Structure formats: structure tokens, C-alpha cells
Image (cartoon, rainbow, N blue to C red):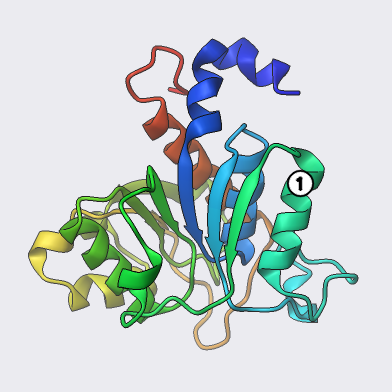
Amino acid sequence: MFDRLELLIGKDIEKLNKANILLIGLGGVGGYVFECLIRSGIENITVIDYDKFDITNLNRQILATNETINMKKTEIALKRALLINSNCHIKTIDVALKEDNINDLISDSYDYIIDACDDVKTKISLIKYAKDHNLKLISCMGTANKKNPLLFKITNLDKTCNDPLAKKIRTSLPKKYLNAKVLWSNEVPLIKGNLGTFCAIPMTAGAIIAQYVINELLKNNENHFR
């Protein structure tokens, strides 16, 4: 089923099949990350999300439909993954990841951790935990109130600008944590207060994060995506 991908990366797809990924958040960005990982042959994914879909998710979340409203995001993600690739092993955890349970929920068995949640304190805790335990992490910064998907980039946290969420996190962390890898956009937010969203923004952010993680998994292989 992954013949077209194998044309690009050859037998390196086996490395993706065996990779073990932790994804926190199945919303706008996280849902697209999940979709890309599944369709790229990654079969072992743990997802953490306590939320349910509501009608306001329909404009931007790939897992949200009229049929999934009021259903658990983890439950729908599991069903979708198996519809795409029946070899997937998806572990679902229906809790809110917090500083006081992070030690119980995260281990060193993951090849990569992807933070697509929207809670500032949780993001800060994840960056600290990953750095302190020498774990690979990429964290998504703000995607609301922006319209240009071409302005996304991945850098260290200390290189961010025009991103209110990144600023909150950056100013809350000691200097030793500021080399955390983050996806962000330098587009100045269009409005303040309410959070408006255009579907191409979380879609693009999720695809870029997934591509980055896949490249990291294939880093020492000649067929990684350049």
C-alpha cells in the first residue's frame, strides 16, 4: 500500500514502520500530523487528548465531521488510522497532560514527541521534560489569527518573533531550554482577542511537522526528504 512512498525512500520505509511516536493533541494541527504520519507508514503512535469534537471544529480539523461531534478525539483517530492502515498500533490516552502526570505518561521509549496541544503550561512542561530526559521533541507554536501558510518555519524557540504564544513560553523558560525545536510563523497576528482560524494554516503546520519528524527518523539514511 505504500508503493508510491517506497519509490522515494526505498526500504527505509521499514524504519518508519518501526518508529514509535507520541502525539499530544488531536486538534487542528495534531489531526493533520496524525493523518500524515499514518499515510507515511508510521504504525506505532500514542495519542494523548482528553477532548471531544464540537461543531466549531468543522472548519479546520480533519478528524471532525458532523458524525463525530461529541465523540472522543482519540476514539475517532483510532478508527481512522485502522481504516487507512490495518497494521497500525494506536494507543489512546484520554486525559489532559499536565505537569503533575507527565512522569506517568511519558517514557524514553518514544523516538519522537510531537506537541500539538494548545495549553501553555503543558507546552512548557513538555519542553522541560524532553530536555531534562534527552528526548526528541518538536512543539507547535501559535497558528490562530494567521492567513499565510507559506510563512511557517522550524527553528529553535529563541529565534521566534511575532508569535504571542511563543513569547509566553520563551519568557517563562530558563535559557537552557530555549534551543527547543518549534514550528512557528512570523506573520503578525491579524486580530487580537478571539482566535480566528483558516483551515490551510493548521493543515500546513501539521504537514510540516510530520515531514520534519520523518526526516529526523531517516536522518542517517540517504533517502530522507531534503
**Location of residue 134 in the rendering, given as x and y in whole percent from the top left corner:** 20, 50
Residue most extreme to the bottom: 193
Q: Which residue bears the numbered disc 1?
A: 82
Residue most extreme to the right: 67
| Badge 1 element | helix
Pick the quarter of the image with the C terminus.
top left
Lateral position of residue 181 relative to residue 20, left or right: left
- Which residue is drawn at the image coordinates 31% and 79% (left, top)? 99
Lateral position of residue 191 relative to residue 226, left or right: right
- Which residue is drawn at the image coordinates 40% and 53% (left, top)? 113
Q: Relative to 16, is 33 above or below?
A: below
Is residue 62 visible in the rendered image? The answer is: no
Pick the quarter of the image with the N terminus.
top right
**Location of residue 72 in the rendering, given as x and y in whole percent from the top left corner:** 71, 74
- Which residue is drawn at the image coordinates 72% and 66% (left, top)? 75
Residue 221 quadrant:
top left
How many neighbours does mark 1 have within 10 angstroms: few (below 14), some (14-19), or many (20 or more)? Answer: some
**Location of residue 51 in the rendering, given as x and y in whole percent from the top left corner:** 63, 78
Q: Relative to 208, is 129 above or below?
A: below
- Which residue is drawn at the image coordinates 47% and 71% (left, top)? 189
